[in-house]
Amino acid sequence: MSDLEIRIAVLERKERRWRLISAASAVAVLVGLATPLYATGGADEAAQRTFDEIRTRRLVVIDDQDRIRVTIDQDAPEIDRYERSAGLTIYDDQGRERGGIATIDDGSAVIALDAPWGVGSPMRDRAGAKVFADGTAAMGVISNRGAFAAVLRSDGDSGHLDLYNPDDDRSLFAQRTLTTGGETMSTNPMAENQRAP
């Protein structure tokens, strides 16, 4: 055989050996992936396995239309807010934020629920609760005009309830405050964007 024929024969043997090694490697990988599935009773059971702990920086839950419905994460460092927060945000079927629960870096914790997009005031907050860093708390509901309708507060050892009623003619909100000691009446100015349309 010529020198060229010998070289071709050697290369063909090497190619056959690499094909066998590649095929064996592929089988080994498939066996390695399939073993846990069969050891736990199949793919369905493997998908339902429970883990003691999962660590991630962000969790996103999507619906059957691949729309984001829930996120759990922390604000980016450059967030345009007085303090960063970390928590859970919920979205409607149009992908619009509808509320959430979070802790704030100032030591407070909040729960908020928003009106649907386009309903009432552009400021969409409608109900919420907050525990401040000093342990005091407030729960409030906001009308569609974007102003508080009622607020329940705890101040130290006691609490009070503020009820608001709009007076568009005088551009005021009448406020009634109820405490265990009685009630008081006062007025607060109404912002132009809080007037009835």
Image (tube, rainbow, N blue to C red):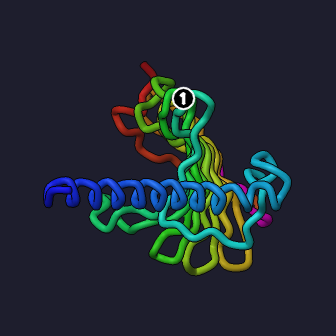
Q: Is residue 35 left or right of residue 91?
A: right
Up/down of 45 relative to 36, above or below: above
Residue at x 40% of width, y 62% of height: 75
Work out which quarter of the rendered image holds the N terminus and state it. bottom left
Rendering coords of residue 33 (x, y %): 64, 58
Asked whether 149 or 12 is in front, the reply is: 12
Rendering coords of residue 77 (x, y %): 31, 68
Amino acid type, residue under disc 1 in the picture = Pro
Kindly indicate the quadrant of the structure image that contains residue 51: bottom right
Residue at x 52% of width, y 39% of height: 68
Furthest-top residue in view? 197
Q: Is residue 9 left or right of residue 36?
A: left
Q: Which residue is mark 1?
A: 116
Residue 184 seen in the current view: no
Q: Is residue 196 magenta?
A: no
Secondary structure, magenta segment, majority class:
strand
Q: Is residue 74 left or right of residue 71?
A: left
Residue at x 53% of width, y 33% of height: 66
Asked whether 104 or 174 is in front, the reply is: 104
Residue at x 50% of width, y 27% of height: 94
Q: Which residues are magenta?
A: 173-181
Asked whether 160 or 71 is in front, the reply is: 71
Rendering coords of residue 136 (x, y %): 63, 73
Q: How many marks?
A: 1
Furthest-front residue in view? 1
Kindly indicate the quadrant of the structure image that contains residue 32: bottom right
Asked whether 149 or 51 is in front, the reply is: 51
Up/down of 159 relative to 88, above or below: below
Q: Which secondary structure, mark 1?
A: loop
Residue 155 seen in the current view: yes
Work out which quarter of the rendered image holds the C terminus and state it. top left
